[in-house]
Amino acid sequence: MSVDELKEKLLQVETDAVAELERADTTVRLEELRLEFLGQKGTLTMVLRGLGMLSKEERPPVGELANRVKERIASEISARKEHFYRLELERRLSGETLDVTLPGTGLALGHQHPLTLVTERIIEIFYGMGFSLAVGPEVETEYYNFDALNTPADHPARDEQDTFYTDAGSSVVLRSQTSTVQIRIMEQQKPPLRIISPGRVYRNEEINARKYPIFHQVEGLLIDRDVTLGQLKGTLNEFIRVFFGRPLKTRFRPDFFPFTEPSAELDSQCPFCLGDGCRTCGHRGWLELLGCGMVDPNVLKGVGIDPDIWSGFAFGMGIDRLAMLKYGVSDIRHFWSSDLRFLEQF
Ligand SMILES: [Zn+2]
């Protein structure tokens, strides 16, 4: 083949390619054409094989033309691709308009457990009366759990049937009350003291609707000069009023606790029936809410506080029970169920 013939062929390939590319209507077709013209067995390659028949002097101008044709076809292909891409983008943009009025998918956030909510509410109320927060260990020695709290050696609470003893030694127990924190604070700080101490406690009890081996208590302690039973009553009446959101009658029934003297059980008028009697209060009109009393001078002496100068009161209540009353929960086991149908109600 002569130089002129080859040049003519190359120009013909160019013309054909450009015409075909213009007619191509998909990117798939573009790829087919790329192979057809520029591929290893493509038209252009075939024509270029004819270069070998030419003399050294004849080759350069033909090679130059071949390169120009190749570049032209390649750039034509990418221009068409770009064109298709833009068309596709425009089609999508007009078809898939963004509806900003659609509700968002949202992220499900958890919330606090009802026992935590009630604990924080209790802390908040006592903060308002000048108490500060104190916490202590859940694994305790018998000394803090019983001895320092004036509990006699033969007291039934020490029985293994009531208290969980650990393998760490016969005198290491899971605390059965939060009063342990009172002792620790009285050892570390000088009076006057006003502390509130919520936390988990453990008792070896059979599980039923009202009892669970793990529960929560909040304990309060006030030590100052000339503390009276009237101040204890006033503090607790105010707490009950704020907690239940209305003033309620209260009554103190004499009771016994080793670390207070005198000791009392505080009943409040039932906040649901206001004394008329309902299911919650067992038709008595009263609810047993908490234990309290004046700190026994022996307890003060034991931690090095002079009972002739200082006196105080202490109280303790079950957070689970208060939560059950506040939210109308009939079974304490719900708090441990991890059942979202229950937990999502708070
Ligand atoms: Zn009632």
Image (cartoon, helix red, strand yellow):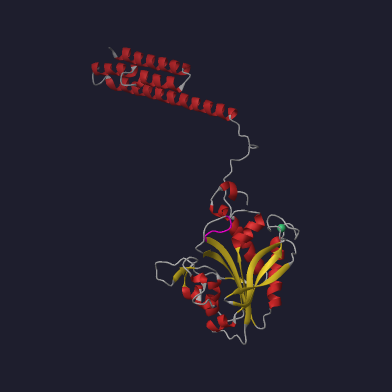
Residue 252 shown left or right of residue 87 in the figure? right
* Magenta span main SS: loop
Which residue is pictured at 68% across the width and 70% down the height?
A: 236
Q: Which residues are magenta?
A: 209-213
**In magenta segment, residue 281:** no
Rendered-image quarter of ligand 1? bottom right
Residue 120 horizontal/vertical position (percent): 61, 62
Which residue is pictured at 54% across the width and 78% down the height?
A: 150
Q: Can I make out residue 48 in this image?
A: yes
167 and 341: which one is in front?
A: 167
Residue 274 horizontal/vertical position (percent): 75, 60
Residue 320 horizontal/vertical position (percent): 59, 60
Which residue is pictured at 32% across the width and 14% down the height?
A: 6
The quadrant in which the N terminus is found is top left
Quadrant of the image occupied by residue 238: bottom right
Up-down relation of residue 31 to residue 331 (above or below):
above
Residue 223 shown left or right of residue 206 in the figure? right
Which residue is pictured at 38% across the width and 25% down the height?
A: 71
Up-down relation of residue 279 to residue 60 (above or below):
below
Residue 224 shown left or right of residue 154 in the figure? right
Quadrant of the image occupied by residue 119: bottom right
Q: Can I make out residue 303 in this image?
A: no
